[in-house]
Amino acid sequence: MRDLRGMGEANLLHGRASHFTSRRFFRDAAKRYAAQHGDGNGGIVASVEFLTLTAWSPAASQQQPARRGSGQVSLREALN
């Protein structure tokens, strides 16, 4: 969270409410959503999209690769 807040990504709404959202709000939102996207049998139609990002940054304490050509076993021989 510290990294996200440092980038300004914790909450993009500058004028956001400083209190918890009420149960009534979520209940009313669920009713409106069901009215707009209901399937007629008491269910709702919805789609979800997930986006996963992974980042990596080298560190000085990380294991370093061996010098090129310093191997003791031929990759060609190991694969045959």
Image (cartoon, helix red, strand yellow):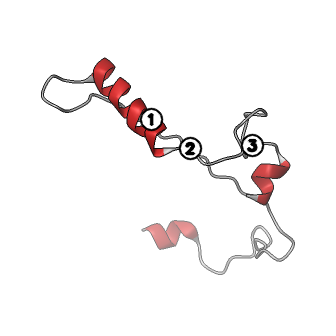
Q: Amino acid at mark 1?
A: Glu
- Asked whether the residues under the numbered discs 1 and 2 touch, taking CB atoms below 8 Å apart as contact, a structural biologist would say no
Which class describes the residues within 10 Å of circle 3: few (<14), some (14-19), or many (20+)?
few
Q: Amino acid at mark 2?
A: Thr
Position of the N terminus, as image quadrant, is: bottom right
Q: In terms of secondary structure, where does tag 1 sit?
A: loop
* Between 51 and 74, the one nearer to me in the picture: 51
Which of labels 3 and 1 is toward the front?
A: 3
Q: In terms of secondary structure, where does tag 2 sit?
A: loop
Q: Which residue is mark 2?
A: 21
* Between 53 and 28, the one nearer to me in the picture: 28
Identify which residue is drawn at 60% across, 48% down.
20
Identify which residue is drawn at 79% across, 59% down.
2
Residue 11's x, y, as percent?
72, 41
Q: Up-down: is 63 above or below 56? A: below
Outermost residue to the left: 41
N-terminal label among 3 and 2: 3
Please give left or right for residue 15 compared with residue 60 in the image: left
Residue 43's x, y, as percent?
20, 33
Q: Which residue is mark 1?
A: 49
Q: Up-down: is 56 above or below 17? A: below
Residue 21's x, y, as percent?
56, 44
- Asked whether the residues under the numbered discs 3 and 1 touch, taking CB atoms below 8 Å apart as contact, a structural biologist would say no
Q: Up-down: is 51 above or below 47? A: below
N-terminal label among 1 and 2: 2
